[in-house]
Every structure is written in structure tokens, then in C-alpha cells.
Image (cartoon, coloured by chain):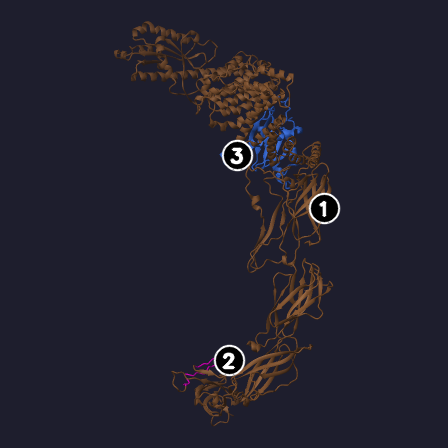
Amino acid sequence: MENKPFITCEGDQNLFSSLHGDLVQRLPLEPVEWRRSYGRPPRMVQVEANFVPFTDEMLPKEGDMSLLRQPFFHMFWTDCPDVDVYKIQTKDEITLWLQKLRIYNIQDWMIVLVANSDAKKNKLLPRTTVIDKIKSDFCSKQADRCLVIYDPLVDSPKSLESWVALVQRLKQLLLVSFNRNLGQFEDNMRAQRERRTEVDWNFCRYFLVQEELAFVFEMLKQYEDALVQYDELDALFTQFVLNIQAGDIPEWLGSFSRPCTCWDGLYLWQPVNYDKRDLIQENTATLLDLRNYLFSRQCALLFFLQRPWEVAQRTLPFVHNVIRELEILELTLPAGAVACWAFMSCLEVLQMIERCSDSSQVEAYSPYTASIWAYAREKLHELGVMCGLMPDMNPSSEQLHMVVDLLAGMGQKQERVFSVKFEVYKVKSAETTPKAESIPNSPDKKLREALSSKAAFQKHYLELSELAMGTYKHIGRIRSARRIGKDLAAFYMMLGDARKAESFLSDALKMYQREGWGLLATNTCKDLAFCQKELNNMQKYAESCSLLASNDLLSPADRTHFYNELLTVCAKSSGDGDSSILLHMEPMMTITDVCIDTEKRHPILGSTVHITLLMQSSLSEDMLFDKVTLVLQREPREPSVTSQSEEKPSEPGADKTLSEPPRFHKRSVSAGCMSSLRGWNGQAASNQIPSYLNVQAECQVKPDGSLNWSGINCPSASQFLRRQDSSHSLVKGQEVVKEEGDLNLEIGNIRLKTGDNKVCFTTTVESRGLFTVRQLILRLSSAEFASSRIWPPASYEVASQNPTITLTPLQDLLAGIPQQIQVTVCTGDHVLPQDTTIVFSTTPQLTLKAPQDRHGRVTKQDAADDESPGDVEYQTEDEGGVLMLKLPTVEAYHRLQLTVWATAEIPDLGLAGEEGYRTDVEHKVSFKSPLVKDEPETTFMFHYPFLAKNQLHTAGDSKFVHVEVVGLSTAKFDLQDPDLTISDLQDSDTAVRLTPLHQDSPMVVYRDQTVSYLWQLHPEELQGLPQLSCRFSLQYCLQGSQQQTPYNYSFTLNSFKTLYQVETSVETPTGSEKCQAGVLCPLRLLITSTSNPGDRQQTDSVPLMYEVMADNTMWAVCGKSSGVVSMPTTAMTTKEVLLEVMPLIGGYLPVPVVQLSQYQELPSSDNKELSPSNVEPSPDSDEPSLDDLGPSHPGQVFFEHGQVYSCSQAQQVHVLPANNGGNLVITFQ
Amino acid sequence: MTGQRSSKMAVCVAVISKENYPLYIQTIPTEDDLKFHYTVHTSLDVVEEKINNVGKTTNDLRELYLGLLYPTEDYKVYGYVTNTKIKFVVVVESSNTALRDNEIRTMFRKLHNAYTDLVCNPFYTPGDRITSRVFEKVVNAMMLQDS
């Protein structure tokens, strides 16, 4: 039935019926704005109407406030062609009609005149047409109540225009009527509601009244407003029921307290369930009837509003509320009836939602439907248990009766067909895929089926569970899904399908463990354990048992049960002869601390190490383990050279980080932290930073040895600082891993008590390296409990030291005499075998010799100095100057010290060409030994004890050789047998005599002490000898020692013969007896050639250049200070040069020195005397030396030392002080 | 009307850490703790959903009170999230109609204050299970019979 407002039509029925179709069609075409009273927002409405002939019965009776049945509007149709007909007939009709209306106080009417457009042309006078007449007669005040429509069946502009006007007018007037009527209705309704506390008030009656309003709104397609009416009714009823709790029971509620015999579910397939409505009307509705009807109406309106999610949203609160109301009203329903109702209602809603929405709305309603699915599943489960349909039950006859009763209460089977109305829901939805063909099983059909047999129940239950789980997963409510999974697991367990159950349970367990919900995890684990036992998965079962037995959330009885189970499983699996089962040790046993106790800081080979583990047993009872194995890993370490070198900074320039033994920074110490690693008892493990961080000290050293930077580093920082993703990083299954151990320490038969235990391991160090405690394995029968990697790592390092050989001088080494060098052999952790050899090789001129006694001192390597050393003997071999030591057996970590004598020869420095400035000599010693890898080299510096220097002296023709021995060492040396030989003169006839002028007694030399020896050469024997090679030798010995050692020093004398003698003399000026300062004196220069011409060039004369080297503080050379003389080559010729000098001060002044040098004329220059302006005396050359003073003039060549003899050397001249020339006037008075 | 009201204020109060592990769960009666553990744990789904949805739409300070998380036949579960993502969950009986939104809000406010006091205690490490007696007292007061 369709609700449309009624409009009655009076007048010419034939006329109207010809126009009826047009009018009905045109009316709803355009929506019109509906302005409403009470400040409600205006709405656009499409007006539709149901036109019916006017009858008296249609008119409302007194007091009947019904809206739906009464007409809202009344029309009078006439086609009265002229005024005459009007006057005769139509006027009366209208009058009669209006009179009837007035009786009922109806103001919503309208008169329509259907006119022929031609008739209008006859109109000559005003107010003479029919319409004018009608207006003047009836509508004098309301001109809009009368309308003309021209040629309604003709398609002309005029006709169209009049149609539009008519429809427009009709709509407006209709809405005015609505407003009026609704206003009246609402007032009435409100008045009724106000009377709700009165005794004779009835909710059902009121319900129908307000529902009528809702119908009107629905009729006007104002679903929102319609929904409000129902919501108000809902709230009103709810409040009434709630008030019952407070003892306020109105009489009408008694009808709802009738026992329900029918528990039909919701019925949403029709917008209005008239069956139920009738019940309400008859006041025979039960609570369920009323609630079902009310909610179905709300749902219908929500579907009209395209809000299926709201239906879903309201469903569960609705169901819960109804159940609560049933309780409050203390309605007695058969057991399970409510569940049936709830189940069917939920399914009905779900089916409807699925049917009445498109895919775009799935997202919107899924969050709600998921819970509805879950709830329906719960209800079905409830029914299953109640009716004995669970897999582990067999329905009793009582339960079968119950099923029959429940089925009976499901009442009438409603026809599931798509009502026409229902299609309305779909029309507006974007996708109109009619699913009418595939009507699913109706909820009650499903329920009937499910309750009919165990198999059917199982099928439906599983289907429902999967749907609920799937929807939960789809919307991301994993926890809810897991919980259903857990229930499902229980169901599968009943079915005997432990495998399926296991997967559900382990999923749930993982989640509870990960999120740290101990109680839930324990509970799930318990279920899982049963499941695993069922599956005969002993490995997993034992694992679960160990977890449960050590779980303090479990009751003591349960713990003991699982403890015993664990023992049984372990014992049983050993009987099978299978490979042992490997289990986690934690959290059954946890290692709280590891102590390593060694004798020393670094244990050495052969020493004993005690490792103590502090363990905590979480079991409620003691457990006896067959064997406890501690697994240690060995990390080979580069053997360090000495224990000291470890502390040395890294090599300069090495850009390496010092890897110190890792130190661990403790964040917090709590006994429970270990167990939390597996996320069992406490906090979720995945997000946690472990209690211990591995932090290393690092530093970098610059090439020059200074520190570049230092700091601490956590190598695994990235692991902990990694961004934690939200929920999706599932904890990976932690496999038990048995670590590869290099050293296993074992203890048999150990009982671990509840609580703290101490387990000690003792071992003797047998190999070197860094030993780290990695894992503990407890063995019980054939089961092994392996700990996770022990953290923080506890380790000990077996110090490893290679033997070393070092050479150290015992004092400052002196060349020439035997010196002691100490050889130190540190054995490290090696034992020196007998006859370990050390072969020394040296640079030439260094000899090593073993001492006479061949005893070495043996001490412990780390012994204090005052410890008395042991004494060992060793062997030596000396082959061709190569010393080889054969060492005796020496224990590890001992030091063997012995000395060898090293003698470095003093080389003949003169021969070596090194002019005695070096005072020391470098020698290298390298040794080869099986103890050390390559041939290390040690450098020693030997200092010379003394040095010899030579000098040539000249006196006229005579020559003297002077050798000076300079002491360098603080040690005193005796010098004997000095001798000088001319080595290059073999022939005895040309022998050169050397007459020693020194004493022949032994001399002593030491630091800063010199010894001089002097020999005279005879000039006559030197004729024709260009040079002399001399060799000085003496015997020396260290004072106190008897050993005489020869010392040699070779040197060569060149151009040593005297060629010229120079004699200078300052003569007194003429006329005075003495020279006087400031007075010019003649300087006489006599140059005498002393040598034979045969020695000279084959020229008559040679140019010689002279230069006066006078101290310019004493002498001023006047005129020229230098010049060139031509010297005849014949022997004993003399040249005289006169110069003038002036003494500047008085006293005994040294005679100015004149330096003679050869002069070679330059090819370009003339053979003339150098003018004084050209030859400047060098101002500072008062003591010219041939060695360091280069020629100051071109062509000047200096003579060798000894070729020119200055006769007047060291002569002085007496100079009187200057006469200042002033007369001293003495006046006497 | 008030004379007959004998229902409890809350039957379960839970404090849940940022990482979703329970810091504190108190239930009445205590025998039902497993059931309430499940209820509270499941409610975290909705809590997370609500937190995430809020984050998407508004930038300003979100409301800490999350409202009714989900109803069950017997209980209503309410949620509250502090700014440090500590979750409070309160379960009340559905039959207790005296508890309106406002009362629930007050409960959460009290709970939040108690939690703040707890965190201010230097001897409490955030993230540890709550054993404070003061806190327990506050919770117990919420779960007491409303007289």
C-alpha cells in the first residue's frame, strides 16, 4: 500500500477523470520548497497525491486525528460553459460542496474551471464570464482558490501555461494544507504524549499516532524526519522500561509482560511489516514484536537514506538493549529463544546490508558488521552448547525437545520475495544489480538447518566464524580476529582436528607474547600444549611444558602437572631412541650472572679458570639434570709481543682503532631482564633495547703520534635505533640454536633448586685465545635445554706471548776495547728446548765473543728485581767470527740474561779519509734464532776513546811533524810506543830520518787531555820528495788492563818544502831613533828564494804577489799595500820591496805580516805592476790562512802551508806614543 | 529511585602501555580476570583504530577520551588515551544505566591524575608494571559499590 495524500474531487467526475492522468503525472514533476513551521528547515519536496471522488465519509469525524486516511485537499471541477448554466446548476453544486466543507471547518479547497479558450473571445463585459462569477461568488477573499485551465487536452501554449499555473497553485495549497494539518496533528500528538503518566495512557496507541506522522514524512520522502519520529518512540519506550527498574510500572506495560511465544527475528524485507503493526494496533504485541517492528522501520528509513552502515551500527546496541529489556521485564522465554532471536536478527541485518549497499559502502559498514558476525557466531555457539550440538556432545532427548520448542517459536515463515517497495531501496543506489534471483537462505531457515544436526551446525558455525574472522582481519582488528581464532581452535579441538587448532593457537600465542599479555599467553599456551600433545609433537609439547611449568601466572597444580609432563616427555623421547629434542632453556632457567675467576688477570697456559654461573630456576620444583654443558667459543688472538705492549699506544701513523676488549655498559640490572627477551612474562620484547649495550672505546692516532679523536661506539646501534614499525613486525620464531663451541665444560648430575642456583665450572687452560662463554646446555634424559646466547658476554683471555730476544749494552760503548752487551731472552709462553741457538752476525770490524764463564741468569719474567736469579750454563760456538749461543732449557715465562763481549776496532781514520771529526762509529748486530721469525737488527754506537791529529811546523828549512792525541773518553788510557814511519819510502838510501823530540815514556790520555808527539825532518833529506805518507802508530791499553792494542793513524804531507823566506822589518824613520805613532816608517820587505831552480818552472822569474796583512788598529799601510814582484828563479836571490806604514798607537807592535802568493798574469792584462788602487788590501785579512781564505785577486794562487817561511814572525817593533805636537807652556808667577 | 542502585562503577580498570602490554589490570570479581583480559586486549583494536582515525583528520589536540569502544551484551568498554599513548580502559556493566558519559569521563580524569602522580614518582620507571598502592587505591575507589 502506498501512502499518498488524498485529494477529493467533486463536480464533473467525467471531466476530471479525463484530466486525472495528466494531473497525477504533472504534479510530482518539479519539487517545491516546503516552508515549515516551528523554525524547522525548509525542504524541497515532490508532491504526489491520490485523487479520489468526494464522499461525505471521507470527511474527518469529530476527534479523529488520523492523518493518513483523511483528505488533505478538496477540489471542485467544472466545465460550465456559460454564465447561465452556471447560475442554474453549477453555482448550487458549489455552494452545497462548500457548505459540507465548512461543516468540518475545512479551508483547503479549490475550484477548477475547465474552459475553452475560444469562449474567452465572447467576453465583452467584465465580470460576466463563468470564472468571474465563481470568483465573485465564492472566492471573494481568496482569489487563488479559483483557477481556469484552458483546453487541457490540447497541446497549445496557452493550455500549457494554464497547466503549470494549476499544478503550481495546487502544490502550494497542498503544502499549506499539510502545514496546517501536521501542525494540528503534532499539537494533538504532543498533548497525548504529555498524558503518558496517566493511567489509561497506552504506548501502543501513542505509537500509532506518532508513527502516522512518520508515515506522512515518509510519504513526502522526508525520511530523516520520519526517522526522528521512530527514534523518539524508541527513546520513549526505552525510558519507560528503564523506569521499571525504579519500580515505576505503568499499566499498559503489562501487555508487554506477556510471555513471548514467538521469537521471530527481525524482518527487514518490507519497509512496513504490517503483520507486526497489526499486533501493535491490536495491543497484543509482545516486546519482541514491538522492538522488531520499531527497528525494522528505522532500518527501512535508513536504507531509504542510503545509510546501511548506520543500520549496522545500530544493530548490536539494539540487540543488546532488547536483551536487557527482556531481563528488566522479567520475561520468561524458553532457553535459547533469545539467542535464536538475536542470531536471526543479526543475520537478517547482515543479509540486508549486503543486499542494499554497493561496494563503496563496504568500508563504511565493515567495522560494524564484523562485530555483528562475531556476535551471531557467539549466539550460535551458545545455542550449540545448549542444544548439545557441539562436536563433543550428543544431544539428549531433553535437548532435542528444546530444539523443537525453539523451532516452533520461530513462528511464521515469511515469504522471502522482493517486495516492490524493497526495490525502492535499490533504485537510488549507484549500482543496481538486482540480486533478486539469489535470495540467500533466510536467517530462520539457516537457524533451523543449523539446529537440525551436528554436521549442519558445524558447517554453519565454521562458516560464521570464518566470516567474522575474515571481516575482522579485513578491517585490521587482528586482536579480535585472533580471539575468534582461539575459540575456533577450541572447536577444532573438539572436532579432533588438532592441527588446525594448533595454527590458530600459535598465531594467538605469538600475538599475546609479542604484546606482553602474560595471562592470555599463558592461557593460550596451555591450550596449545594440549593440542601439541594431541598431535604428538613432543618437541613442541616439551617446549610448552617447560614454559608453563615455569610460569608463575599458572596455578601451582597446573605447574606441577606440566612439570611432571615435561619429565615424562623427556624420559619418553629418550626411550624412542630418536635424536634428542632441543628446547629453550629460558624462561625455565635463566642465567643471571656469569663470574669468571682466574688466578691472574690474564690466565696463562696451564692455569686454572673457574666459571661460576648464577642461575635462577623458575620451576616450582627442583630438577635434576644429567649433564650441564657450558659452551665456550675461542677466538684466536694475535699473540702479543709482551704483556706491556698491549698497553702501548698504537703505532705512530697507524690509523687503526684500538679494539680493546669490549666493555659493556650496563643500563639496568634486573633479574627479570633475561626472561623478557622472549617476551614472556613482561614487556614486549620486540621494541625493547636490551639491558646491556655493547659499547667499545675507540681512538684514532694521528701519524705524529698525537691523539686525533677518541670516543665510544656501539657497533649494534643501528639495530636498536632502527625505527620501530607499528604492529606489523611479527616476532620471528626463535629457533633454538646450539652454538658451535671450541671448549665444552661439563658437569654431571646437578640438581637445580627453585630460585637461585650456583653452578661452578673449572677448567685448565690448554690453548691460547679469547674464550667467551656462549651457551649453557642442560641435559635431561635426551632432552637438551639450550640457553640463548649469554649476554653480556663473559670472557677470559689466555695471554699469549712469543719469546723475545733483546740486546742491550750495559754501558756507553767504547771502540777499541771489549765491551759488554747483555742478551735477554724472554721465553713468553714457550718452553725453550735444549740447545736453542742464537747466531749473531755483525757488521765488519765488530767482533762478538762469549765470556769465559758462560753462565746466564734465569729469572721469572714478572719477578721483582730482588728475586734471586737462577743460574744456568750455556754453550757457545765460534765459527769464523760468527758467534753462536746454544741455550739450555728454560721454562715458560722466564727470562734468561747473559752477556757477550763486543769489540769494535778503531779504524785508521786517516786512511778512511775522515778528518777526525767523528767521535763514534755505528755497528749493527743481527741474530737468527728459531725463537723469532726474521733477523732482528740492533744498532750500537761505539765511541772512540781518543783521536789523533797531525800538524806540520816549519822553521826556515827545517820541518817538524806534530801528532796530537786528544782524549775523548772519561776512561784513562795508557799510550806507549809512539812511532812515526814514512810508509812510501822503500829504498833505504833515500831514507828520511825522523828524529823524535818527545819523551819516550808512556803517556796517559783521557777526556780533554791531549798528548803531543813531535818529530823533526831534516831538509837535506827531503830533496826531490813531493809528498810524504806518514803512519803514526802507538800501543794503548785501558788503565788497569794488560791488553795492549795497536792504534794507527795515517796522514800525508804535501808540498812541504820551503820555497821563499819573507823578512819584513819596520825601520825607524830617518832622523829619529824610534818609531813614533803617527809618523810614517819605511817597511822593508825582503823575499829570498831558497829552493833549487830544478824544482821550479823553467822560466827566469816568477811573479810573486805580496800583501801586507797589517792589523788596521795598529798599522796603517800608506801607499800600496800589495804588489807584484818578479822573482828570479835562481836560488838564494833576494828581492827587496820598500813600503811605508804608519803605526797608529804606541808600544811594542807586531811587525806587519806580509803574505806571499803566486801570481799568474792574466792573458789580457799588461805586465805591469798593479796600481795600489787596483790592489786593495783586504781589510780583515790580518791573519790570512791558506785554507779558508780564497784568492782576493784574479791570478793569485796561495802557497801551501810550509812553502813560505816568514822569518820575522812574532817580531815586534817599539813604537813611541804619538807626539801631539803641542807645547806645554808653564808660567811661573 | 536511587535506593535500588547497587551496581558497581567499574568492573575492570586497565592501564596499558604505549606498546600495548598491560601495566595494570584490576577486575571485580577477580576470578573473571581472564575474561576481562581478553576484553581489554580486544578493545585495543578499537583504540588503535580511533587513534589512527583522529590523527588523519585533525591536527589540533585530540580529545583524550575515546568514548565507548564497543558494547558487548553484558559490558560496555570505554577508552582513553594519554598524550604519551598510555591507554586506560574501563569496563562497566551494561546494566548500570546510572553511568553516563559524564561519569565515565570523570573516572578517566581521576585515573589520569593518579597515573600522572605515579609517573612523577622518581622510583617508578615508566613502562614497569604498576604496583603503587596509591594508584590502586584510586582504582579501587572506582570499582567500589556506588553507594
| Whole-percent x, y for residue A466 in the image | 56, 27
**Mark 3 residue type:** Asn
Q: Are marks 1 and 3 on the same chain?
A: no
Q: Which quadrant holds residue A530? A: top right
Q: Residue at label 3?
A: B52
How far is the residue under mark 2 from the one under mark 1?
88 Å
Q: Residues within 10 Å of mark 3 (few under 14, many from 20)?
A: few
Secondary structure at numbered mark 2 = loop
Q: Nearer the viewer, residue A235 or A293?
A: A293
Choose the circle earlier in sequence order: 2 or 1. 1
Q: Are marks 3 and 2 on the same chain?
A: no
**Mark 2 residue type:** Asp
Most common SS among magenta residues: loop
Identify the residue shown where x is 57% and y is 19%.
A449
| Whole-percent x, y for residue A1054 in the image | 52, 83
Q: Which chain is brown?
A: A
Q: Colour of chain B?
A: blue
What's the chain of the residue with tag 2? A
- The N terminus of chain A, quarter of image: top left
Q: Can the viewer see residue A222 in this picture?
A: no
Q: Nearer the viewer, residue A1134 or A150?
A: A1134
What mark, if any, has residue A1187 been given in the picture? 2
Q: Residue at label 1?
A: A760
Residue A539 is one of the magenta-drawn residues: no
The magenta stretch spans which residues? A1170-1193
| Whole-percent x, y for residue A1192 in the image | 45, 81
